[in-house]
Amino acid sequence: MKLLISGICGFVGSTLARELIAAGHQVTGFDNYIRPGSETNREPLEKLGAKVITADLRDIRALSGLPAADFIIDAAANPSVLAGVDGKTSSRELIDHNLIGTVNLLEYCKQHRAGFILLSTSRVYSIPPLANLHVEPVDNAFQPATNTCLPPGLTSAGVDETFSTQAPVSLYGATKLTSEALAFEYGETFNFPVFINRCGVLAGAGQFGRADQGIFAYWVNSYMRRRPLKYIGFGGHGYQVRDCLHPRDLAPLLEKQMAAAKLPVADRLINCSGGAGSARSLRQLSDWCATKFCAFEIASDSTPRPFDIPWMVLDSAKAARLWNWQPQTSTAAILEEIAAHAAANPHWLDLSAPH
């Protein structure tokens, strides 16, 4: 199958490209190299047989010149929930990149009759019920409090696809949620297949770690190098929890989706995550690092940040039911992989997350 990957030189795009090439697919991709470190992935991908084109998904004329493909995998985005409000990117830049860029890709699909797979996010789910969730610390990590009424769509297994997407979800979440809606409308109107995969936190070796995106890679690299780290919000204890998924585990799912017959729209939107079994708090991550590298002190700041959530775990039961999909890489294996990469690349944070 001929595949086109947006953001092919990013962590997720490059990981999927390697897996899909190994599975026998013809892979072309494009990137604008806006993310520091992404340019390092170009040559290795080309050596594997990928065709890598320099292009920006915001440039409709550049996209119109791309070769035809059977499917687009959209792995390009500004993935920070603080984007548009952190002073590093403007709200207009965020919308141009995450929403208008998606529209441009959908126009490409319309032109070439290509299918479309959007890698979306857990941050499309409504913030207030998650931020106000009653939690309690257990083994240095928050979990939903026992004997409390949970909001619809949330259980101890995590947030499922029926959970509210009512605003506010952050500007970032809104760009992805709107992209999802437009993708389905384009697909239904112009008769091409669309799949939406809402991903939890993606992590692995070679990720461009920053505190607001790529937190697992950022934390392990920073801890190893004894760089300053800080628990922010929620009392400054580091009990806030996220799940963890290696993007290579998505590749078999994408292959099944691309080979599928036409399905109802409701069956083409799923959560994809490592689930509750993969979830770790920052404090637990520090404990792992302390055992691996020797302990050092983490600073504490109880000041809350916008859009922070104490416990964010996705329930992927629907993906298991519809696609027989389960993540294959454990959190322990992901952390070991990140640590090995950090040891082999001592200047990784300087390259991928310059101050």
Image (spheres, helix red, strand yellow):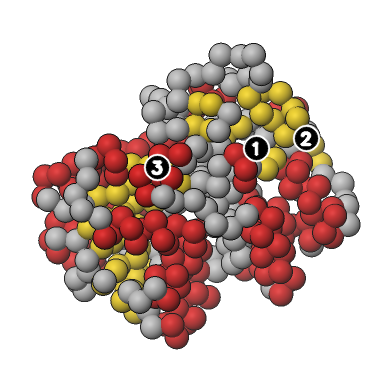
- Where is residue 58? Give x, y as percent: 30, 57
Q: Residues within 10 Å of mark 3 (few under 14, many from 20)?
A: few
Q: Nearer the viewer, mark 1 or mark 3?
A: 3
Rendered residue at 56%/14% (across/down): 149
Q: Amino acid at mark 1?
A: Val
What residue is disc 2 on?
A: 140
Q: Nearer the viewer, residue 7 or 121?
A: 121
> Picture quarter containing residue 280?
top right
- Where is residue 244? Give x, y as percent: 59, 49
Q: Amino acid at mark 3?
A: Arg
Q: Are marks 1 and 2 in contact (CB under 8 Å)?
A: no
What residue is disc 3 on?
A: 321
Classify residue 252 as left or right of residue 267: right
Classify residue 336 as left or right of residue 49: right
CA–CA distance between discs 3 and 2? 32 Å
Mark earlier in primary sequence (1, 3): 1
Which residue is farthest bottom? 47
The numbered dot on residue 241 is: 1
Identify whether 340 is placed above or below 331.
below
> Picture quarter containing residue 111?
bottom left
Mark earlier in primary sequence (3, 2): 2
